[in-house]
């Protein structure tokens, strides 16, 4: 039983590290290239959030006919799920933690970009990432790896 608990805890840490790495090095670094698949993050999502004070209308409803931040994010998340299927039978609790983290990420990220007050209260690090300086605060679900890597910066985002 301890092994399952340890697996789950390690899965949460792994997922948070992956979120930090992906946000910083893929969504922002590769996203700077205008013709990259990842450009949607900076050139669409961040730009829209600056104009709309954190709100991204692309999260209001999900349609299969719209290729926007939400749909691209879900495709990437589906890819992450598929990549981890082979290890589920070996490390079920670890993989379950990764899947739970993905679901929680999606819920929190979507809600933060639809409800500014909720974002400020429950995800101040993500709110600050969008409105106080996009070169820090890479985590969404929990700021664990931002603290660990020294990238949790309390900025002067608007109140």
Image (spheres, rainbow, N blue to C red):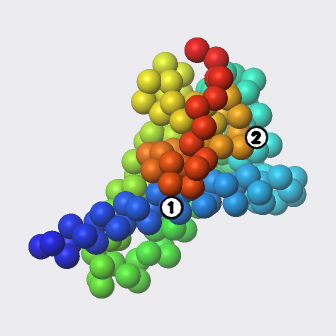
User: Regarding mark 2 in the picture, which secondary structure is present there?
Assistant: helix
Q: Is there CB contact under 8 Å for labels 1 and 2? A: no
The furthest residue to the left: 1
Neighbours of disc 1 within 10 Å: few (<14), some (14-19), many (20+):
many
Left or right: 86, with 53 as reference point: left
Q: Is residue 66 above or below residue 87?
A: above
* Res 54 → quadrant: top right
| Mark carried by residue 137 | none
Q: Which residue is mark 2?
A: 44
| Rendered location of residue 52, percent (x, y) | 69, 22
User: Regarding mark 1 in the picture, which secondary structure is present there?
Assistant: helix
Left or right: 46, with 57 as reference point: right
The residue closer to the viewer here, 105 or 17, is 17
| Mark carried by residue 17 | 1
Neighbours of disc 2 within 10 Å: few (<14), some (14-19), many (20+):
some
Observer able to see residue 51 = yes
Left or right: 19, with 34 as reference point: left
Among the two numbered marks 1 and 2 on one chain, the one whose residue lies closer to the N terminus = 1
């Amino acid at each position: 039983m301890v092994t399952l608990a340890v697996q789950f805890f390690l899965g949460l840490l792994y997922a948070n590290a992956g979120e930090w790495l992906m946000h910083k090095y893929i969504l922002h670094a590769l996203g700077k290239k205008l013709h990259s698949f990842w450009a949607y993050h900076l050139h669409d999502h961040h730009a829209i959030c600056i104009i709309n004070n954190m709100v991204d209308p692309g999260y209001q409803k999900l349609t299969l006919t719209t290729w926007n931040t939400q749909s691209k994010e879900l495709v990437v998340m589906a890819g992450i799920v598929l990549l981890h299927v082979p290890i589920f039978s070996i490390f079920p609790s670890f993989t379950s933690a990764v899947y739970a983290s993905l679901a929680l990420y999606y819920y929190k990220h979507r809600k933060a970009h639809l409800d500014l007050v909720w974002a400020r209260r429950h995800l101040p690090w993500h709110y600050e990432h969008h409105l106080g300086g996009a070169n820090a605060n890479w985590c969404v679900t929990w700021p664990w790896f931002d603290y660990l890597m020294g990238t949790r910066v309390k900025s002067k985002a608007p109140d």
